[in-house]
């Protein structure tokens, strides 16, 4: 190998859940260059605009390289001692549920695992939730209702082996660009049909065969209509349904009552009869069909029902876990699935075990030798910040996330952090949230971190360090362990390196688990340090004896007590909040192509900012005219939760009565809008995921 190539380090992009492999290299002058890893199965050498600009985000601007207490520089011992003492005091005085962690899909699996072990096994509370609650909690809940566990059955190859790809609630072209490129390449090679279901005409619709610009929130009606259509047209795979599922009769009964005719569906969804009919015919006649869904489905007061409405159609046709088929949740964050594997959500236990099963709780407690095992689920994100604001949570530790920008009703989150007795923030850089920290703990960033992530298709990949640790920063797993030991949790947190944590995580998956389906669940528990370092991207779990990509559930066995999948009868519900004379528009929020989350990294790259330097509200020409607004005007935006400002863009991509604002901007960026301030904290009753995609809005001239 030439010297120049030898210096490249194989790592994984820290942005979206596609999980692209990156080759990173540091030149002798310190400049970082990146290119796509041609050997990584997720991206095969490609990177999107954000990934390609990673090298330009490695500067130290905005970083804090030492701990701070009360805004002043402190040494690690003093800061860690204070955190341990304040958490211990709160627990002693008010009980374990008086403390909470709010963590992040940016964390590596090892960080996630240690934080969950500390809170759920040693503090004795499940008050640990993650910003993944804003991202895919409805998919998790939908999978559990239908499959018995949170299983993503498909692999990315399914997008290329499908004859029909249905992209619903997903601006894949901008939010998962490399997957979109793979879909387009397959379309050019084999003529894949693409249907886009989205109230907006996004870039994803540019090359589609059919764009269904349905009314916001009517997805259940559309997919109930599809289920009823499949039954009417004899397209149900009756032998599959009989052998591998239960609940079909009640699901079809509810769907047929909800969506008795194509005409009723079209009227209810704001679509034409011809378009709905075409979609149903495409789905009926293409055996190899994948339905890809993302935040437009999940971020809803009825997100879980939407997920199950989609899954019902795939169960009815037996299109799950076979090449080119399946419902496929694509997620936002780099450790899309890793957090789910370690039980990162407040209502989950590690290794896909559940608080609903007392035997699961005991099994995890035995494995951890846990002195104080949590016995019930904890506070989910929206409730967690509510509890911090009203005094139930006395000590809160926020890790690697910026909730005062990203949470809905963000004004209330800011007030909660002000009111909370003790707030710790560990993060790579100073953010809007760090200003509320009593203690700031500087964390290692991408290029310094060392650990594992799992992408949207269950593929484990390594994030490897290629830079020296800056200043005094520490890995998240180490910071958490340092505090845990100070709280008296001792040897259980005496980790020497991330490989040791990963082995423990893998061993928990295999613990007292006979592996009845012959999955190599525990195989990774014996990885040597050297094998961990050399780890090649792979799916997990994978049936024993398989080396290559592996789908799950394709044999018709589901991880339910009787091995059968569940149809879940779902009805189209009314909106959580309706428009009125005061708030007549519907606001939708989402990502831009070149920005990531709250812009703490991508906002520092001029060429990424160049395409969209300001926050812009998209309005239909009729809505702009009705308010006397012209292109480029500054508009005042208000909802029942807060207000913001943005420049007006007039576009026919919006339907009349609907508006769109990017989610990224915050107070860091002068004159900026903060979508979180406007968004509704109403949540899905099953998943606790907030309805970030839909809130009544008023727009006036500023
Ligand atoms: Fe790949 Fe997503 Fe990173 Fe782009 S942002 S390079 S699609 S992982």
Image: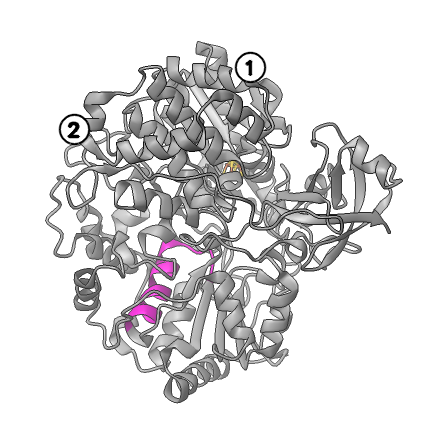
Question: Tags 1 and 2 in contact by the CB under 8 Å rule?
Answer: no
Q: Give left or right: position of 290 versus 15.
A: left
Prevailing secondary structure of the magenta residues: helix
The reply to whether the magenta stretch includes residue 237 is no
Q: Which mark is residue 243?
A: 2
Q: Where on the picture, by quarter, is residue 291?
A: top left
> In the displayed structure, would residue 501 be above or below residue 198?
below
Q: Where on the picture, by quarter, is residue 693?
A: top right
> In the displayed structure, would residue 622 be above or below residue 447?
above
Residue at (10% x, 49% y) in the render: 514
> In the displayed structure, would residue 697 be above or below residue 308?
below
Q: Which element type, helix, strand or loop, lies under badge 1?
A: helix
Residue under label 1, please give it.
274
Percent position (x, y) of residue 72?
63, 80
Q: Which element type, helix, strand or loop, lies under badge 2?
A: helix
Q: Give left or right: position of 201 versus 152.
A: right
Task: Please report whichever mark, 1 or 2, sits nearer to the chain's N-terminal start.
Answer: 2
Task: Give the spatial CA distance, label 1 vs label 2.
Answer: 35 Å
The reply to whether the magenta stretch includes residue 111 is yes
Screen quadrant of the N terminus? top left
Q: Which residues are the magenta region?
A: 103-121
Q: Is residue 674 visible?
A: yes
> In the displayed structure, would residue 325 be above or below residue 8?
above
Q: Is residue 534 visible?
A: no
Q: Where on the picture, by quarter, is residue 27?
A: top right
Graded by Cα atoms within 10 Å as few (under 14), some (14 to 19) or many (20 or more), the crowding at tag 2 reads: few
Percent position (x, y) of residue 558?
21, 38
Q: Nearer the viewer, residue 242 or 66?
A: 242
Residue at (23% x, 27% y) in the render: 241
Residue at (60% x, 35% y) in the render: 49
């Amino acid at each position: 190998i030439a010297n120049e190539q030898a210096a490249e380090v194989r790592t994984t992009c820290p942005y979206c859940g596609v999980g692209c492999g990156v080759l990173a290299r540091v030149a002798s002058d310190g400049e970082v260059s990146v290119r796509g890893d041609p050997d990584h199965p997720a991206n095969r050498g490609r990177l999107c605009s954000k990934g390609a600009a990673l090298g330009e985000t490695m500067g130290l601007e905005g970083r804090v390289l030492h701990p701070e207490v009360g805004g002043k520089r402190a040494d690690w011992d003093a800061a860690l001692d204070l955190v341990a003492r304040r958490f211990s005091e709160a627990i002693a005085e008010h009980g374990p549920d008086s403390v909470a962690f709010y963590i992040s899909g940016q964390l590596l699996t090892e960080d996630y695992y240690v934080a969950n072990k500390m809170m759920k096994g040693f503090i004795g509370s499940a008050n640990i939730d993650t910003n993944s609650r804003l991202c895919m909690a409805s998919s998790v809940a939908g999978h559990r209702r239908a499959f018995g566990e949170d299983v993503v059955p498909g692999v990315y190859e399914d997008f290329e082996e499908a004859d029909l790809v249905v992209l619903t609630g997903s601006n894949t072209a901008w939010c998962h660009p490399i997957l979109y490129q793979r879909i387009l390449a397959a379309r050019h090679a084999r003529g894949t049909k693409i249907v886009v279901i989205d109230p907006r005409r996004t870039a994803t619709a540019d090359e589609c065969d059919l764009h269904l610009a349905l009314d916001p929130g009517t997805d259940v009606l559309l997919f109930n209509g599809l289920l009823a259509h499949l039954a009417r047209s004899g397209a149900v795979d009756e032998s599959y349904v009989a052998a591998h599922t239960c609940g079909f009769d009640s699901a079809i009964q509810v769907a047929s009552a909800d969506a008795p005719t194509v005409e009723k569906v079209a009227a209810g969804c704001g679509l034409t009869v011809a378009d709905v009919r075409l979609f149903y015919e495409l789905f009926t006649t293409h055996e190899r069909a994948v339905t890809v869904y993302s935040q437009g489905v999940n971020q809803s007061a009825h997100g879980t029902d939407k997920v199950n409405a989609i899954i019902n159609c795939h169960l009815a046709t037996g299109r799950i876990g076979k090449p080119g088929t399946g419902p496929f949740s694509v997620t936002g964050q780099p450790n899309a699935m890793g957090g789910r594997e370690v039980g990162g959500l407040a209502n989950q236990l590690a290794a896909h075990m559940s608080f609903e099963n007392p035997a699961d709780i005991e099994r995890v407690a035995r494995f951890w030798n846990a002195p104080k095992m949590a016995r019930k689920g904890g506070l989910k994100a929206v409730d967690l910040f509510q509890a911090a604001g009203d005094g139930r949570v006395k000590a809160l530790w926020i890790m690697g996330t910026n909730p005062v920008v990203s949470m809905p009703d963000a004004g209330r989150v800011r007030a909660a952090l002000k009111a909370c007795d003790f707030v710790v923030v560990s993060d790579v850089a100073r953010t809007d949230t760090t200003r509320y920290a009593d203690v700031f703990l500087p964390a290692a960033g991408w290029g310094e971190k060392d650990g594992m992530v799992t992408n949207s298709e269950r593929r484990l990949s390594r994030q490897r360090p290629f830079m020296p640790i800056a200043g005094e920063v520490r890995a998240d797993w180490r910071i958490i362990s340092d505090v845990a030991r100070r709280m008296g949790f001792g040897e259980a947190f005496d980790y020497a390196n991330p490989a040791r944590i990963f082995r423990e995580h893998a061993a928990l998956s295999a613990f007292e688990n006979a592996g009845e389906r012959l999955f190599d669940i525990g195989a990774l528990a014996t990885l040597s340090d050297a094998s961990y370092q050399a780890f090649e991207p792979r799916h997990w779990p994978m049936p024993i004896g398989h080396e290559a990509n592996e789908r799950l559930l394709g044999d018709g066995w589901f991880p339910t007590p009787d091995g059968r999948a569940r149809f879940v009868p779902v009805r189209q519900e009314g909106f959580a909040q309706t428009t009125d004379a005061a708030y007549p528009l519907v606001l939708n929020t989402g990502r831009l192509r070149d920005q990531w989350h709250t812009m703490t990294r991508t906002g520092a790259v001029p060429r990424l900012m160049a395409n969209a330097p300001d926050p812009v509200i998209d309005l239909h020409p009729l809505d702009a005219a009705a308010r006397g607004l012209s292109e480029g005007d500054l508009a005042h935006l208000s909802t029942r939760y807060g207000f913001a400002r943005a420049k007006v863009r007039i576009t026919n991509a919006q339907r009349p009565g609907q508006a769109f604002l990017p989610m990224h901007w915050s107070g860091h960026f002068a004159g900026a809008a903060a979508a979180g301030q406007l968004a509704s904290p109403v949540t899905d009753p099953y998943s606790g995921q907030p309805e970030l995609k839909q809130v009544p809005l008023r727009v006036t001239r500023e």
